[in-house]
Amino acid sequence: MYEQLKGDILFCMFYAAVAVLPLVAGFYLWFRRANAFAPQITSPVRLRRWMAAFFACMTLSHVWYIPILFQSSKEEALNTYLIGGLLDSLTVFPLSLIVLLVMMQDRRRPLWPAVALMLPVVGALIWSIVNCSDALFTGISTYSLLLSIFFFIYMVRALRQYGHWLRDNYADLEHKEVWQNSIVLVAIQILLGFYAFSVETLVFQYIMQMTCIVLVFYLLWRVETLSDLHLPENEIEEDEEVVAIGKENEKTLQTFNRNDIGQLLKSHCEDKQLYLQQGISVAQMAKKIGTNRLYLGRYLSSQGVTYNTYINELRIRHFIDLYHKTAAAHQPLVIKNLASQSGFSSYSTFGLAFKQVMGMTATEWMRTVEPQDK
């Protein structure tokens, strides 16, 4: 393969272009705070910085493999490959895991395990470099495969928890989608799989570089279209105080939920139609009705609903009332406008919520009520 790469000028040029691409993306994320892809969204600064570091290391990963393209002996190429693998194990691999963890904003997960898990690979590669041997390649590949499977299972579980957290805290899930994080997980796993079980053909190397291009653009787009969900410092401090009080007097907390929160929601959220405010979070709702996020969250949980379900049910009920009133007044029925007036930020969000609440699409429901409205 090395002889093929050495003689293929086109591949060398393509390889260099792919190396520059993540560097440009990294500089963009590091120095630009406003989003170019989605100007209306504020993306997490912490994620932008970690992703910029990941992109920079993707470029470096390309750079320290360049000597292979010009080395004639297999021993030199093997040594370069081993050193590159060692540097990747210290940078690209742990950073890819860190990026996936940082994308979940429900809490700050410890990042050091991402580095610690790579230490056996680092040790094996150092031994291989010292002895200029590929004897441990099978063991390294096996460990990498097991690590990949373990992390994939961990991430699936963590993403499920993250999805529950989103539904418990946000009425609108647009720009917060868990399935997008799942795609990022699969995409990075595929790229790492290509790397770990690389096939020594020129065609495969082209495929791998194309995969890098797609991954860079997708990750850049994902960062730009992901909303920053971190709470302001004052709200975090308030929540910590409430948690401390709740632990001291759990019985009082449960009594307060049962006796007061339902009435507060009825008199403030439902009667005053606070649910029509687009993007209102559970923390904002709690403050508006005169309670706090912990109390409100526990009350909704005791009722067997998430905050997202509760708000969407109110919005769909409002939409249905609005639809009947508009139809009775013989006014034009523009569903997108009615959905917007019912608190939905987009028609796609409305469509999903309507089907979850009513068990059918909005179009199907309208067919069932048309004869009654005529």
Image (spheres, helix red, strand yellow):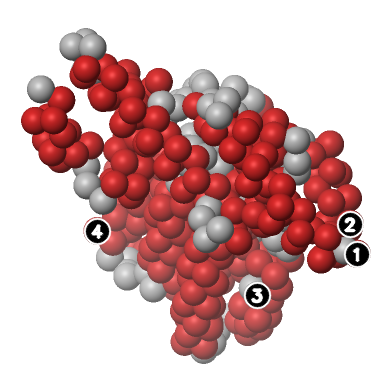
Quick one: label 3 or label 2, which is nearer the N terminus?
A: 3
Quick one: label 1 or label 3, which is nearer the N terminus?
A: 3
Q: Are marks 3 and 4 in contact (CB under 8 Å)?
A: no
Quick one: label 2 or label 4, which is nearer the N terminus?
A: 4
Q: What residue would you read off at disc 4?
A: 203
Q: Are marks 2 and 4 in contact (CB under 8 Å)?
A: no
Q: Quadrant of residue 336?
A: top left
Q: Secondary structure at mark 4?
A: helix
Front in this rendered view, residue 231 or 94: 231
The residues bearing labels 3 and 2 have C-alpha atoms spaced at a distance of: 38 Å
Q: What residue would you read off at disc 3?
A: 117
Q: Secondary structure at mark 2?
A: helix
Type of amino acid at the residue the image marks with label 3:
Leu
For the N terminus, give its image quadrant: bottom left
Q: Residue at x 75, y 35 (%)?
A: 290
Label placed on residue 248: 1
